[in-house]
Image (spheres, rainbow, N blue to C red):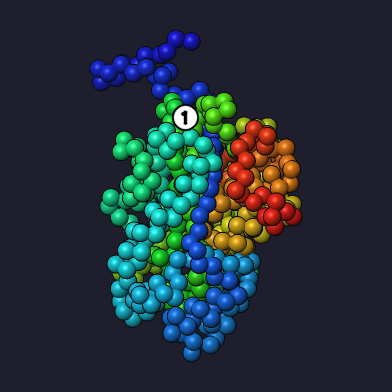
Amino acid sequence: MPPTSVQSSGLKCQKALQAAESVATVLAIATAVPPTEFLQSEYPDFLFRVCDCDAKIALKDKFRRICEKTEIRKRNIFLTEEVLKANPSICFRDAGHSLRERQDIAAVQVPKLAQEAAVKAIKEWGRPKSDITHVVFGTTCGIHMPGADLQFSKLMGLETTVKRVMMYQIGCSGGAAVLRVAKDLAENNKGARVLVVCSEGTALGFVPPNEDKPEELVETALFGDGAVCVIVGADPIPKVDRPLFELLWAGECFVPESDKAVYGDLTEVGMDFHLTRKVPFLISDNIAKLLNQARKIVNNPNWNDMFWAIHGGGPAILRKIETALQLAPHKLAATREVLREYGNVYSGSCLFALDQIRLRSLAMDASTTGESCEYGFLCAFGPGLTMDALLLSSVPTTANFVDETRNYTLNAVLP
Ligand code: CAA
């Protein structure tokens, strides 16, 4: 078919030359976490000691009970005792300010962690970083101008002409939102290779224990730091690009009348985050409606015949989703593994889970990257209440590049 010409503002555009011919694909995924691991069983002692709250015995007992229910084994967190001692206002609300200190930590840590993940992703991809045409950068940790996208691009030594999209304060649904934006960029710019990053941390949201706000204990027990980088491109070049998943559909919805269910407010003492007990119910009541829009495109497979990379917001959310969709227990194994080993890594969680799924597929000797399921969903939930999702199709595992440095067999992830 000859290219269609469009006359617009006196400029003649060759439309057919701009769009890609295939849907966008995931070409590589890699993750990074800060070096300090906190065992969940030891975190209550740590938190109450550094915040000088050991006298609040009942509150500490409650926090310990919450920690025990999170199904988290450990989290990697940049806010170590050393960092907190160097920035004491973060631990003591009475100081009345700590935004400056939090912003300074985020300004350094967010791009740095992103760089660690991106270096690994580019290695797996196997092409030079000069082939990256776009950056989509998401974080809920900090707000700067210019943003973390620019600092990251400089650290990486990307071309100065790289086209950047910065998505700040995206919350936990952002892991799917960045992929949705990358899909649009890749499919509408022929030859584009998009470096997608979510780099998250607790620097803005860390709060000292407070009897008046028990919901903050839940946040403090759940969130962890981590970055994930995904390379996205359409029209994969045979024997050069090795796709892991195709991105078939992307959608988003907000749940009406859920404004105050989960929201944040940036204040002098950091992110004032509000979380109600309604969240698991709002998600489970609305998830099928969003996903059914996409499921019909691929002839309505059973939910249990699909693979699942879900935002591990907390065990109550996962339990409610399993019940709503009648998922077999092993279907959310990758998501639970991420929650157990890293905590709730904000926007990064669902992408960490996608990485786990392809690692599990290799460890299981599955025929495809989607644990031998042809189609799967990546879903994430965030303030709004917002739900973001992508429909993916997996590809044969043999078509993929196997990075020998990654330990597939020792992942204790199989059901
Ligand atoms: N606020 C305050 N306290 C809470 C609470 C909440 N939202 N949820 C539970 N608790 C308290 C309970 O009252 C209980 O306290 P006591 O021991 O003093 O009675 C304690 O936590 C333990 O509760 P349960 O015994 O009922 O244990 P559980 O099995 O429900 O596990 C939990 C607790 C891990 C917090 C679980 O309820 C959970 O996963 N909740 C969902 C957490 C959540 O909303 N995560 C989303 C974070 S935000 C995000 O990811 C993005 C987004 O927008 C969705």
The image quadrant where one finds the C terminus is bottom right
Q: Is residue 213 left or right of residue 363?
A: left
Q: Where is 61 relative to 296, above or below?
A: below
Q: Closest to the observer: 214 or 363?
A: 363
91 to 271, vertically: above or below: below
In this view, 38 is above or below 25: below
Image quadrant, ligand 1? bottom right
- In this orientation, does residue 348 appear? no
> Residue 243: x, y in percent?
58, 34
The residue that label 1 is drawn on is 187
For the point 36% across and 40% down, the residue is 158
Up the image or down, 123 lies above or below 66; here it is above
- The image quarter in which residue 105 lies: bottom left
Residue 185 percent coordinates (x, y): 43, 34
Give the class, few, some or many, for how many residues have Cα within 10 Å of label 1's Cα (few <14, many ≥20). many
Q: Amino acid at mark 1?
A: Glu
The residue depicted at 46 percent of the width and 47 percent of the height is 118
Please identify the quarter of the rendering in which residue 393 is found.
Answer: top right
Can you name the residue that lies furthest to the front here?
A: 404
**Which residue lies at the image location 64% right of the left edge and 32% below the top edge?**
399
Q: Residue at x 54, y 60 (%)?
A: 344
Judging from the image, what secondary structure is the residue with disc 1 in? Answer: helix
Return the x and y of residue 340 as percentages of the image width and height: 62, 62
